[in-house]
């Protein structure tokens, strides 16, 4: 009887032990599965964060490249404008004269060469005078000055349809002072380039 009791106790102990071990394995398996899910979720979150960071960096690079491209375009446009301003600087005239002076012939030849290279661009030649004389006289003189420059460019091979003239007479002085230096600046042909 004692041995039966002892066997029963041993069998029950084994069963309890097996049950406990089985539950522990199941709990370990469940913990492992939960950990794997957490790791996978964290990896997905990390991948999303890395992707978002890469996209943000790419956008930042694209913005910087666009900014650099615009800055370069602006620099080139400024350089071109400065070169054009120097090339198409005013041609000045003597008092009450409209003939192109010898000192401006090389500049007009360079202007002609540029206009030939930029065949779609047109030019407006403005005739200006100093303040002395009547408004009507100065308008006529300004027109003769502009026409003189136009003729010179046409003689150098520029199509006359690409050149327009206008006279402002004494209405738009470059220098408003009333002295010989200012008057010399105001007796001029001024150029406006119209790119197409």
Image (cartoon, rainbow, N blue to C red):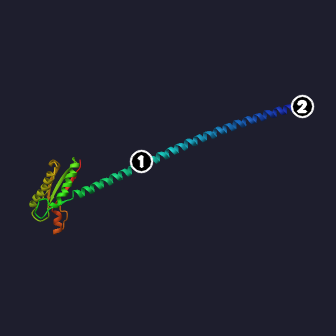
Looking at the picture, how far across and down is residue 33, in whole percent?
64, 37
Disc 2 to disc 1: CB gap under 8 Å = no
Q: From this viewpoint, which residue is outermost toward the right?
A: 1
- Dot 1 falls on a residue whose secondary structure is helix
Nearer the camera: disc 2 or disc 1: 1
Label 2 to label 1: alpha-carbon separation: 87 Å
Asked whether residue 178 appears in the rendered view, the answer is no
Q: Residue at x 17, y 48 (%)?
A: 162
Residue highlighted by disc 2: 3
Asked whether residue 13 appears in the rendered view, the answer is yes
Q: Nearer the viewer, residue 16 or 186?
A: 186
Looking at the picture, how far across and down is residue 54, in whole percent?
48, 46
Q: Residue at x 70, y 35 (%)?
A: 26
Q: Residues within 10 Å of mark 2 (few under 14, many from 20)?
A: few
Q: Residues within 10 Å of mark 1 (few under 14, many from 20)?
A: few
Q: How many marks?
A: 2
Residue highlighted by disc 1: 62
User: Quick check: 114 above or below 23?
Assistant: below
Looking at the picture, how far across and down is residue 176, in whole percent?
19, 66
Looking at the picture, how far across and down is residue 195, in whole percent?
23, 49
Task: Say whether residue 93 is left or right of residue 74.
Answer: left
Instruction: Give the mark nearer the N terminus: 2 vs 1.
Output: 2
């Amino acid at each position: 009887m004692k041995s039966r009791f002892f066997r029963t106790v041993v069998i029950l102990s084994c069963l309890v032990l097996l049950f406990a071990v089985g539950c522990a394995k199941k709990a370990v398996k469940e913990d492992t599965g939960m950990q794997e899910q957490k790791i996978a979720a964290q990896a997905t979150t990390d991948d999303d964060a890395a992707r978002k960071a890469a996209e943000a960096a790419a956008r930042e690079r694209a913005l910087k490249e666009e900014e650099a491209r615009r800055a370069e375009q602006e620099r080139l446009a400024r350089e071109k404008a400065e070169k054009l301003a120097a090339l198409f600087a005013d041609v000045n005239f003597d008092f009450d004269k409209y003939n192109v002076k010898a000192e401006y012939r090389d500049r007009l030849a360079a202007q002609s060469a540029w206009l030939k290279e930029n065949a779609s661009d047109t030019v407006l030649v403005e005739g200006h005078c100093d303040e002395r004389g009547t408004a009507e006289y100065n308008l006529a003189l300004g027109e003769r000055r502009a026409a003189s420059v136009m003729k010179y460019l046409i003689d150098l091979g520029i199509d006359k349809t690409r050149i327009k003239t206008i006279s402002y007479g004494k209405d738009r002085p470059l220098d408003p002072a009333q002295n010989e230096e200012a008057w010399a600046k105001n007796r001029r042909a001024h150029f406006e380039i119209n790119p197409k």
